[in-house]
Image: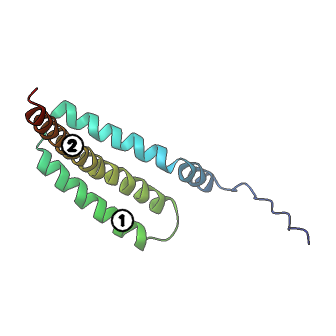
Amino acid sequence: MNDPLIIEARPSSARERLRQRIRGRRFMLSGVLALVEVVGFLIWRPSAVLLATLAVVVLALSVMGATRVRPGLLRDLLWIVAIAQAIVVVIPLVVGLSLVAGLIVAIVLIVGLVLIAARWRV
């Protein structure tokens, strides 16, 4: 049995072409937006707690909006904002956890070396 031939038609309106272009670059645009936010944070140095709280609120609102809006350009833009805010919220957590994990490993190694040195009287 042969598979049917599927031809995807190019969108007819400019709005649909823009939507297709944005949808295809959703993660890149989210990354660029998150990068702009991080650079802005580094330049202006606002309160980290306030900015983290704002990022979580914007993330929640954009996800709620994206799940309630019909498919279209607005929904795609809300998902881009949501992904960017998730990046801004998750990366500091991951870096913080990796620093804590690194410190724990370093402490365990130092304690191990001290115990070995005490045992061998080095």
Residue 48 at x, y percent in the picture: 14, 45
Cα–Cα span, label 2 and label 1: 37 Å
* Residue 7 sits above or below residue 84 on the image: below
Q: Position of residue 82 (x, y in %)?
A: 36, 57
> What amino acid is at disc 2?
Val
Q: Where in the figure is residue 53, as x and y percent of width and height?
A: 17, 56
Q: Residue at x 10, y 35 (%)?
A: 114
In the image, is residue 107 above or below residue 59? above
Q: Secondary structure at mark 2?
A: helix
Relative height, residue 91 to residue 106 (above, below): below
36 on left or right of 46: right
Residue, x 75% and y 59% (percent of image)?
8
Q: Is residue 66 left or right of residue 41?
A: right
- Secondary element type, mark 1: helix
Q: Residue lying at the far top in this picture: please name it.
A: 122
Which part of the image, by quadrant, shows the C terminus? top left
Q: Quadrant of residue 74?
A: bottom left
Quickly name the residue at label 1: 63
Q: Residue at x 20, y 30 (%)?
A: 43
Mark number for residue 105? Answer: 2
